[in-house]
Every structure is written in structure tokens, then in C-alpha cells.
């Protein structure tokens, strides 16, 4: 239910499209700040390759957003991000615009009263600490996927979101892709009958390359390396642990398990989200998991091959591996398969041609992830993919990773979010952190 602004201001709590109520948080644009009253002030934290394209451009082009600040621990990237924003607005306004501020510490951004929302796109190990601090500061949160590196951290974020009542969005573009939303519409409307099996795979982008031993290197003067490590424990600097200096290539940290789960979560955050959406299990999870896999060795040490099986309480089985980016739903009356970015097929053309009937789900044209986030804030309702669903999605990937590491089947209680009768596996639900910059 979209609320008129006067109702949004009057109410002490509002209904949401998710699983919880959002207490009334009045965005600063409703409190008489100067500037466009229909725009939401956004701060972008983390100015890597995913931010310079597509995150910043999408917010810049939106009539619902104004980027007022950027933040990064790399001064070169920070300067580039600030220039990207100021140059765009200068061109739009026809005069030299310098209204985007730059910060090297995200905590300074969160102290800004004129910031309504944050877009967090840092290395994965910083996602949860920054998002929790943003929730504590009353900022709405768009969080780059995968949202966490372990299940317990994700659970703590969900608790913080509920406590502080902020609106959130998983920054994944897959749901609005027409072929993906069409596939889920058909599956959820029963066009293939009762779901029996789901096959899902991710590409092998972050696996297979050997890495010789890397030397310890001097920390570049433009990088605050201690702040980059943040909640991760101290480690000697070498470029392939972090990111290329004065460049935007795929960073090495994406293959180091201290900062990232690797490909199982990187693309799994997209495609397992489609599995959960199609299976109508966005706020729960499987009851058993088992799998095998292989890890890279050395500095780059994430999974490079895996084969994982999940089973839900409703007897649906999910089979997850590295191959190509697709999801295939098999039911009692046929199958539907969707492959990134725009390939949709089915066991019959009649399935693809069917239209939503009375009482059926119809997704139509969904807003992009950024626009959905901004509209949710303006309307005072939860987004189409809130972070609680993203937590459940990434939990699937992390449970699979735990199963591979232990080499034994896992029994999972999705309501309590606990592994049953396996102390070794349970210990992997939480990753210790260095508390220099953040405490739960």
C-alpha cells in the first residue's frame, strides 16, 4: 500500500510488502530541506568498478535521486567518483556544480543529516558492518550483493533493519529482467504444475587461474589499507589481495575467502535469489544440504568447482553447480528454463504463451533495482527485494559452502537458522571480526 505523504508523516508505523512493519522515518526531503523536494539524497560508499558503472550512472539518471556524497578508502577512486558526479550535474545544470562531497571514512557520511539513503558497494566483508551502522543512523540502504560473508552476520543485519525501521533493497538487477520475471510468473502461476526439482548454475568467472606466491608490497600512498581491511584481520599488503591501483579491473579480493565467498556467492546471490523467488521460499530455506567441491590454493583460495544438493520441507530439490548462468524449474506438468541475460524456454510453447488469469500473479514491467529502492522510500513501503530475502538467498550459498568444507550432509532448521547436531558445521555460521572499526 502506497501512502500519501501526509499520511506517512502522521502515522507511527506503516504496513509493508515484506514481513515486518517499518516505523515512521521521515526522509529529509519531507522536512523542508533545500533542493528538489522529490529527490532523495543518496551517498555512495565504495567507488570500485561496480560503482562507476553501473551504480553511479543509474542514480545520476534518476529523477528521484541526488548523489550528495561519495566515500572510499582509495583516494584515486574517491576523486574519480566525486568528479563523475559533479561533471554530470554540471552538464545537466549548465554551470559548474561542486555539490558532491568526498569522504574517506563512511562514518562521516552517516553523520550527515541531509543523507537519506546509502548505496553500499564495498568489498563484501565490509557490507554488513556498514549496513548495520547505516540502519542505526536511520539511513535507507541499497546493498550490493552478496550482502554478507557468513550467515550470522546477515542475521544481525536483519535484526538491525527491523529494529531501526529502514527501507532496504538488495542491489541485484536480475528480478526486473523481463525473461526472469516472466519465468517466475509462469512458475508461480502453476504453468508447470507442482515444482519437483530446480537446477541452478553460475559461470566460472572467478575460478581456475593459478596464482603464484605473491610478495609483500609497500602500501600505495593513496590507499588507507588498514581501513580497507576493517573488520578483517591484519594481513600483509599485496596488490592481488586488494585491487589494481589506478584501475578498475576485477579485483583480487573477490577470490580471497577473508573478504568474499567467491563465485558460489558472487553470482549465486543473483541466481539463488531466482530459485527462492520461484519456489516461494523467500523468507525460509532448505532443511538439508550436501555437496562436494574443490578450492583454489594460495592467496586466491575460494571454491572453483562445486556440486551441491538442497532439499526443502516440501520435497523440492535444488541442484547447484558451476556451469552457465541459468535456472531450470521442473514440475509435474513440464519445465521452464531461464538463462542470463534473456533466454527463456519451456517444455511447450503453450506454457510460454499463457497469460495470467484471474487471481494469478502478474509482474508486468518491474522497476529497476535502483528505481524500486527510491520509489519504496518515497512511498513509505518496503522494496520488491528487501535485504531479509537477500539474507535468505545468500544463506543458501553459504550453507552449500559449509557442506563442501565439512564434507558431510547438513540438517538445517530454517526457522531458528541453526545447524542441527553438527558442532563443526555450526562453528562456520559465524566469522570472527576485528573490532577496530565496528562492533555488533
Image: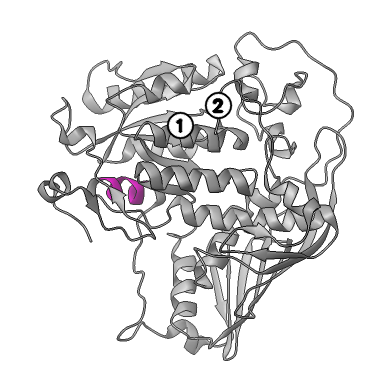
Distance from the alpha carbon under mark 1 to that under mark 2: 8 Å
User: Viewer-proximal residue, 273 or 92?
Assistant: 273
Q: Circle 1 sits in a helix, a strand or a loop, which is it? A: helix
Quadrant where the N terminus sits is: bottom left
Coloring scheme of the render? Answer: one colour
Residue 143 % position (x, y)? 48, 42
Residue that numbered label 2 is attached to: 438
Cβ–Cβ under 8 Å for marks 1 and 2: yes
Q: Residues within 10 Å of mark 1 (few under 14, many from 20)?
A: some
Q: Main secondary structure of the magenta part?
A: helix
Res. 181 visible in picture: yes
Q: Is residue 372 magenta?
A: yes
Residue denoted by label 1: 133
Magenta stretch: give its range: 370-377
Q: Residues within 10 Å of mark 2 (few under 14, many from 20)?
A: some
Compared with residue 53, is residue 290 higher up or lower down, i.e. above or below? below
Q: Is residue 369 above or below residue 190?
A: above
Disc 2 is placed on an element classified as: loop
Residue drawn 13% across and 52% down? Answer: 4
Taking depth in this image into account, of 273 and 75 the one nearest to the observer is 273
Residue 173, visible in the rendered structure: no
Rendered location of residue 33, percent (x, y)? 16, 27
Amino acid at each position: 500500500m502506497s501512502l500519501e505523504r501526509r499520511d506517512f508523516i502522521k502515522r507511527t508505523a506503516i504496513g509493508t510488502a515484506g514481513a515486518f512493519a517499518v516505523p515512521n522515518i521521515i526522509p529529509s526531503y519531507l522536512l523542508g530541506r533545500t533542493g528538489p523536494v522529490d529527490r532523495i539524497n543518496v551517498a555512495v560508499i565504495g567507488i570500485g568498478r561496480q560503482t562507476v558503472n553501473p551504480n553511479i550512472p543509474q542514480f545520476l539518471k534518476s529523477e528521484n535521486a541526488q548523489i550528495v556524497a561519495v566515500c572510499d578508502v582509495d583516494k584515486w577512486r574517491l576523486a574519480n567518483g566525486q568528479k563523475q558526479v559533479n561533471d554530470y550535474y554540471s552538464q545537466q545544470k549548465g554551470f559548474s556544480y561542486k555539490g558532491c562531497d568526498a569522504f574517506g571514512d563512511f562514518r562521516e557520511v552517516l553523520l550527515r543529516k541531509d543523507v537519506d539513503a546509502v548505496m553500499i558497494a564495498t568489498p563484501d566483508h565490509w557490507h554488513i558492518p556498514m549496513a548495520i551502522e547505516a540502519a542505526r543512523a536511520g539511513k535507507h540502504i541499497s546493498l550490493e550483493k552478496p550482502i554478507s560473508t557468513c550467515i550470522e552476520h546477515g542475521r544481525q543485519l536483519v535484526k538491525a533493519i527491523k529494529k531501526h525501521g529502514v527501507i532496504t533493497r538488495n542491489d541485484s538487477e536480475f528480478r526486473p529482467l523481463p525473461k526472469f520475471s516472466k519465468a517466475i510468473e509462469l512458475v508461480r502461476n502453476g504453468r508447470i504444475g507442482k515444482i519437483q526439482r530446480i537446477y541452478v548454475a553460475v559461470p566460472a568467472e572467478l575460478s581456475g587461474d593459478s596464482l603464484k606466491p605473491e610478495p609483500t608490497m609497500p602500501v600505495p600512498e593513496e590507499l588507507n589499507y588498514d581501513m580497507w581491511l576493517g573488520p578483517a584481520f591484519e594481513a600483509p599488503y599485496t596488490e592481488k589481495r586488494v585491487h589494481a591501483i589506478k584501475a578498475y579491473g576485477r579485483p583480487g579480493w573477490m577470490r580471497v575467502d577473508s573478504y568474499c565467498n567467491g563465485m558460489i556467492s558472487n553470482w549465486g546471490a543473483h541466481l539463488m535469489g531466482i530459485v527462492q523467488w520461484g519456489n516461494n521460499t523467500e523468507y525460509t530455506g532448505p532443511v538439508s544440504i550436501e555437496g562436494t567441491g574443490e578450492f583454489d590454493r594460495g592467496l586466491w583460495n575460494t571454491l572453483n568447482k562445486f556440486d551441491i544438493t538442497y532439499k526443502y520441507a516440501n520435497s523440492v530439490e535444488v541442484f547447484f553447480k558451476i556451469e552457465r548462468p541459468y535456472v531450470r524449474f521442473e514440475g509435474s506438468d513440464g519445465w521452464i528454463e531461464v538463462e542470463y541475460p534473456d533466454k527463456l524456454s519451456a517444455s511447450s510453447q503453450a506454457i510460454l504463451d499463457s497469460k495470467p488469469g484471474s487471481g494469478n500473479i502478474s509482474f508486468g514491467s518491474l522497476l529497476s533495482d535502483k528505481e524500486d529502492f527510491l520509489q519504496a522510500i518515497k512511498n513509505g513501503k518496503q522494496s520488491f527485494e528487501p535485504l531479509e530475502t537477500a539474507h535468505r538467498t545468500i544463506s543458501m550459498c553459504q550453507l552449500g559452502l559449509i557442506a563442501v568444507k565439512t564434507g558431510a550432509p547438513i540438517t538445517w532448521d530454517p526457522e531458528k537458522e541453526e545447524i542441527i547436531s553438527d558442532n563443526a558445521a555450526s562453528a562456520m555460521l559465524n566469522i570472527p571480526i576485528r573490532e577496530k572499526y565496528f562492533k555488533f
